């Protein structure tokens, strides 16, 4: 596919990791849901552990950071490149004109869903709309959408619907990423006042009718997604500066810069969403309280167990959005990240960015396949478990548990490292009838208590026949 601005296609945008940074906060304000259907859905979500996030939009054609180059702020992740970089108005016009060239003819969501399922992923969150306002679904609220691009003549042009359907058919829980801010609609960045930052270009309290119009626009789009796109499990809302002024946490640096109230009436949105999708999880990111059913530290793993529902969202490579040459994390690192997160009671939402043609990098498929091989053997230590706060991390060992009687000890091995022959694990209270085995091998291992620690012996015979692994898992049954 012909791409505009080819000089941008080699741009590495690691700044995006900073652009969307949401640090681990004090989540003492977490409010557990009271709705029985939401509680049941939240428990189901906590059991599936591993999901796929996809950032895909007009920005993919230039191979640049998602949306942020439109933002007129003096931040590294907002830097503009190319012949229009010196004039924001010309740049925005050229960016929005990408709608006239977006034609992802290789789009085949079944391929993505099959690869993700094989990797052990069990839920998906797809970008229906990012901050730039371009809709990857057939909304009736604007013509700035995929079905009004050259791809609009394709029978699968309602991309979000096709993605949700393909993954739902593979048994996935389904989530819609939706940006609360919208930098395209005149009701957010009003053309009367040029924008100076990510916030509305006008003061909502001074122009209440304009803000009411934006609230209605947002409500209607979310209502469409909850009405016309099949069973929906998660509404994943980004753009945390769109929030009631009273909800700002002044201990968080980026929240202190929010200049005014941007209340979009989350109570009304959530109520309607759950009327249409009973049990819907609402994730109003970084806005602690009733409408943040689970919290989402971004590109960070808490250094300790957290007793609340949480999810680390993280990129498989360096960028949230497509770049031509990506630096993918190794399968070993990704498996270690997953095990570490699950041991601390969280989920991993791993981002892969489709290309402008509509496919993943070949290396991304390779990583998914490698992860899947490990998961097929060791998945019982991941799924339907909870983090183990009592045992905690011990050197290269992390722990999960299933019910009261089963603990999994996961050894995060270095490259080429064999399973240790002498293993010592503290803080485990076992009676003499407890059994310990290496997952993937039926025989029980010999163990004793030694100075308050469980000492496990791995025979030379077992060590020799155990293939090298990214992580070895002991199953301990009390």
Image (cartoon, grey):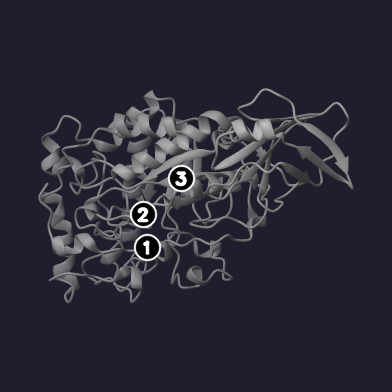
What is the CA distance from the residue labelled 3 to the residue labelled 1?
22 Å
What is the CA distance from the residue labelled 2 to the residue labelled 1?
7 Å
Which is nearer the eye, 156 or 322? 322
Which is nearer the eye, 208 or 296? 296
x, y (%) of residue 209? Answer: 32, 59
**Image position of 466 with respect to 289: above or below:** above
Instruction: Identify the mark nearer the N-term, 3 or 1.
Output: 1
Image check: 454 left or right of 135? right
Secondary structure under the numbered disc 1 in the rendered image: helix
**Image position of 362 with respect to 78: above or below:** above
Q: Residue at x 61, y 41 (%)?
A: 33
Q: Residue at x 75, y 43 (%)?
A: 422
x, y (%) of residue 3? Answer: 13, 54
Image check: 268 left or right of 434? left
Which label lies toward us, 3 or 2? 3
Residue 272 seen in render: no
The answer to whether the residues at label 2 and label 1 have Cβ atoms under 8 Å apart is yes
**Circle 2 is placed at which residue position?**
320
**Circle 3 is placed at which residue position?**
331
Badge 1 crowding class, 10 Å Cα cut-off, few under 14, some 14 to 19, many 20 or more, is many
Which is nearer the eye, 71 or 119? 119
Secondary structure under the numbered disc 2 in the rendered image: loop
Residue 242 seen in render: yes
Badge 3 crowding class, 10 Å Cα cut-off, few under 14, some 14 to 19, many 20 or more, is many
Which label lies toward us, 3 or 1? 3
**Circle 1 is placed at which residue position?**
16
Q: Residue at x 22, y 36 (%)?
A: 107
Instruction: Identify the mark nearer the N-term, 2 or 1.
Output: 1
């Amino acid at each position: 596919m012909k791409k505009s601005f080819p000089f941008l296609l080699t741009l590495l945008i690691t700044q995006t990791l900073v652009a969307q940074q949401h640090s681990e906060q004090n989540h003492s304000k977490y409010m557990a849901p009271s709705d029985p259907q939401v509680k049941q859905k939240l428990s189901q979500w906590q059991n599936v552990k591993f999901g796929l996030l996809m950032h895909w939009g007009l920005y993919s054609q230039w191979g640049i950071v998602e949306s942020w180059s439109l933002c007129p702020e003096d931040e590294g992740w907002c830097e503009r490149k190319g012949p229009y970089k010196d004039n924001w108005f010309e740049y925005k016009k050229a960016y929005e004109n990408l709608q006239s060239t977006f034609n992802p003819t290789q789009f085949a969501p079944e391929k993505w869903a099959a690869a993700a399922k094989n990797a052990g992923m069990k839920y998906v969150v797809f970008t229906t709309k990012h901050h730039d306002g371009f809709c990857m679904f057939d909304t009736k609220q604007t013509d700035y959408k995929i079905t009004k691009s050259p791809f609009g003549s394709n029978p699968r042009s309602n991309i979000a619907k096709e993605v949700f359907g393909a993954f739902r058919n593979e048994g996935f829980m389904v989530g819609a990423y939706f940006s609360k801010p919208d930098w395209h609609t005149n009701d957010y960045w009003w053309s009367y006042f040029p924008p100076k930052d990510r916030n509305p270009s006008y003061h909502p309290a001074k122009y209440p009718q304009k803000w009411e119009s934006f609230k209605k626009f947002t409500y209607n789009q979310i209502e469409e997604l909850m009405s016309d796109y099949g069973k929906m499990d998660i509404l994943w809302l980004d753009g945390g500066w769109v929030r009631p002024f009273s909800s700002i946490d002044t201990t968080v640096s980026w929240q202190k810069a929010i200049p005014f109230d941007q209340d979009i009436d989350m109570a009304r949105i959530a109520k309607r969403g759950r009327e249409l999708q009973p049990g819907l999880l609402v994730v109003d990111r970084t806005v602690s309280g009733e409408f943040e059913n689970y919290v989402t530290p971004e590109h960070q793993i808490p250094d300790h167990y957290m007793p609340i529902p949480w999810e680390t969202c993280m990129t498989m490579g360096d960028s949230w959005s497509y770049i031509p040459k990506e630096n993918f994390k190794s399968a070993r690192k990704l498996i270690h990240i997953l095990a570490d997160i699950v041991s601390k009671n969280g989920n991993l939402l791993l981002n892969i960015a489709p290309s402008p043609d509509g496919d993943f990098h070949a290396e991304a498929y390779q990583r998914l396949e490698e992860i899947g091989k490990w998961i097929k053997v060791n998945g019982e230590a991941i799924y339907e478990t909870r983090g183990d706060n009592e045992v905690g991390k011990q050197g290269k060992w992390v722990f999960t548990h299933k019910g009261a009687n089963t603990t999994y000890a996961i050894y995060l091995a270095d490259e080429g490292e064999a399973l240790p022959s002498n293993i010592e694990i503290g803080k485990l209270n076992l009676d003499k009838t407890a059994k310990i085995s290496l997952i993937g091998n039926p025989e029980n291992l010999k163990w004793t208590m030694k100075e308050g620690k469980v000492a496990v012996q791995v025979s030379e015979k077992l060590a020799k026949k155990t293939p090298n692994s990214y992580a070895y898992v002991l199953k301990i049954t009390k």
